[in-house]
Image (tube, rainbow, N blue to C red):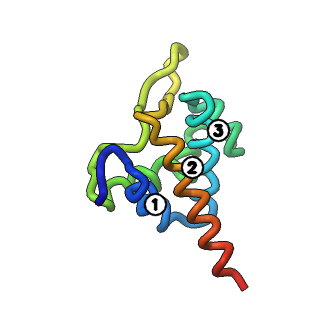
Amino acid sequence: MITPSFNSYTCETFVKSFNDRVLSNTELLYKELATKGQIDSLDLTQLIGVARPSDLPFVLTTPLERRTRAIGLGEEFPWTPDKSPARRTMWRDRDGIAKRMLKAIEKEQARRAAQKP
């Protein structure tokens, strides 16, 4: 059952439709959230390898937000939005979702690898 708490099933459903690039970027985001609990837009920009924070919606945040809505969770995103002291956008892990999301990403990557000839 799909839940706003992003249980394992919700995380697996969430990541299935992402293209490889978005899935890879999602993995980078959630690895950081799982280990540090948060990341700001400048650090995420560098981690993903885009030129500036305004590029993040194209390669990560817009697909994540659209997918959240598509699975029926509206604005219950799998992170907590915040602002850093420097007034930068910040993402924080919400209720341990990051670790569950990483497991779902690993499972999806393994599924895709098994389907390749």
Quadrant including the N terminus: bottom left
Quadrant including the C terminus: bottom right
Q: CA gap, disc 3 to disc 1?
A: 25 Å
Residue at the farthest top position: 85
Q: Residues within 10 Å of mark 1 (few under 14, many from 20)?
A: many
Looking at marks 3 and 1 on the same chain, the residue that comes earlier in the sequence is marked by 1
- Front residue (pair 22, 30): 30
Residue at 38% across, 50% down: 7
Decide: is 17 above or below 55: below
Which type of secondary structure does the marked residue at label 1 adopt? helix
Which type of secondary structure does the marked residue at label 2 adopt? helix
Which residue is the site of mark 3?
A: 45
Check residue 12 in the rendering and tell me which mark sits there, or answer none: 1
Residue 51 occupies quadrant: top right
**Where is residue 46 drawn, in percent x and y?**
70, 37
Q: Amino acid at mark 3?
A: Thr
